[in-house]
Amino acid sequence: MSGPAVLLMAYGTPDTIDAVPGYYTHIRGGRTPSEAAIANLRERYRQVGGMTPLLERTREVRDRLADAFAAAGDPRPVYIGMKHWHPFIAETVAAMQAAGEREVTGLVLAPHYSRMSIGGYRKYLEEASALLPGAPETHVIERWGAAPEFIACMAALIREGLGGFAGSDVTVVFSAHSLPVRIREWDDPYERELEESSRLAAAAAGVSSWRFAWQSAGATGEPWIGPDILTVLGSLAAEGVRHVLQVPIGFVSDHLEVLYDIDIEAAARARELGLALRRTRLPNADPRFIAALLSIITRAESVKVAG
């Protein structure tokens, strides 16, 4: 008998620059951003080619994961739902109900838990299910940043990235999306989980010299967790570091926060500082990442059944 259907959830991305205002408004909970803020976001998308491949990459992950389940003798449908753009999570919940799904395993394509991030996906999922009689029962895997298979995948990408420096001394800088400092008031585990993932991945890759930095803080008028990666790059240059491998361990798919914030903004800062900066590839649909997701999902399901 096949296992439950799978729902992969991701942040979402506008499909054209013209869709940026609607996308940004959804991120802000229905509050329309200022014209200046919209123009700034449009410009960032323009600089990465007009759109990001996040939806395409997520579809690839969906298809490869479905293939992996079938190859394991456990064929099952895999769906995708986006938090802030089409196909919205609510749209996918309706599609799963129409397809007759009764039980679903949900997983957000973000490895580390925070009430503000993963909790937000769960909220959208629960609200959509509550409005739809007969919606499938969904069990969400909330954290998987320390899963051995994910760590092994990241370590392989780190070793690959280090190979591009041809034997030079390299400092590895892990990064993830910053969140407002107020998450600490809730004893939110986000920071601890990211530190653990970074430590495990560095050890698995044989890396002894590494730092952690934050990136992509929002312009909300409240303090966000730091230090920002631009600040960390300045500190490294002042210490005499000349080669940096950047590992965006909080992200698993190509998205604006990596394609612009790292590949354009951080890269420009590194050039100003005389640093040689390279970035690891993201997992995307790498076979090692697909195998990791397969293991993470089936293990979580077996624990649920045993419990």
Image: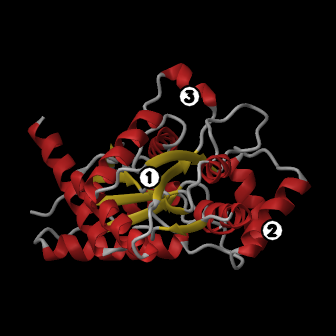
Q: Secondary structure at mark 3?
A: helix
Along the line of sight, the residue nearer the viewer: 3 or 108: 108
Horizontal side, residue 29 vs residue 150: left or right: right
Measured as percent of width and height from the top left, residue 109 is found at 42, 57
Q: Is residue 68 visible?
A: yes
Q: Secondary structure at mark 1?
A: loop
Q: From the image, which quarter does the C terminus lie in? A: top left
Q: Which residue is mark 2?
A: 43
Measured as percent of width and height from the top left, residue 139 is found at 30, 44
Measured as percent of width and height from the top left, residue 80 is found at 43, 64
**Residue at the (46%, 36%) spot, across then down:** 190
Q: Earlier in the sequence, mark 2 or mark 1?
A: 2
Q: From the image, which quarter does the N terminus lie in? A: bottom left
> What residue occupies the far top of the structure in this picture?
185
Crowding near pointer 1: few (<14 within 10 Å), some, many (20+)? many
Q: Secondary structure at mark 2?
A: helix
Q: Are marks 3 and 2 in contact (CB under 8 Å)?
A: no
Q: Which residue is mark 3?
A: 183
